[in-house]
Amino acid sequence: MHGVKHHLQHADTLFRLQRHAHGGPEAIRRFQERKLRFLVNHARENVPLYQNKFDAAGVRVKDIRGLDDLPLIPRTSKPEMRAAEFREQTASGTSRQDVWLRYTAGSTGEPAHIYRKPVEDHLLNQFRIRASRLLGQRPKDS
């Protein structure tokens, strides 16, 4: 069920990606808040690192209702992510074969790694493509 729920969320995001390019601020905010609630719930239920951080901060999933509640979410630093084992920072049931390892320097210049499923990479690419199109770039531009 875990995988099905995620695939439905990604399909929903892809569908709404095009729709929200022309949506108003309120529609975009509702979309963002719904995705935020899904993400927080998923992290709390399935990812040991975030389960521990939420518990230590005394934050419950029901405390995060919208964007105004973002400051309640405990932050995770790059050193914490580097120190965490694979099983701590990925959802239960995820194997190394299910994910791609990506590296980023980010704003600090310190290397960090991120595990992502191929469908998540695809979704991020769709966001990049949409942003480029909205800025006037055409598919044949390089």
Image (cartoon, helix red, strand yellow):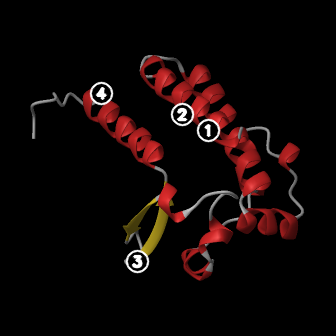
Describe residue 35's horizontal placement relative to residue 18 as left or right.
Answer: right
The answer to whether residue 76 is visible is no
Disc 4 to disc 1: CB gap under 8 Å? no
Residue 28 lies in what quarter of the image? top right
Residue at 26 percent of width and 28 percent of height = 133
Disc 2 to disc 1: CB gap under 8 Å? yes
Q: For marks 1 and 3, give the CA distance.
A: 28 Å
Q: To which residue does mark 3 refer?
A: 111
- Closer to us: mark 4 or mark 2? 2
- Closer to us: mark 1 or mark 3? 1
Q: In front: 30, or 39?
A: 39
Q: To which residue does mark 1 refer?
A: 6
User: Where, quadrant-wise, is the C terminus in this rendering?
Assistant: top left
What type is the residue that disc 1 sits on?
His
User: Which badge, 3 or 4, comes first in the chain's sequence?
Assistant: 3
Residue 37 lies in what quarter of the image? top right
Q: For marks 4 and 2, give the CA distance.
A: 21 Å
Q: Residues within 10 Å of mark 4 (few under 14, many from 20)?
A: few
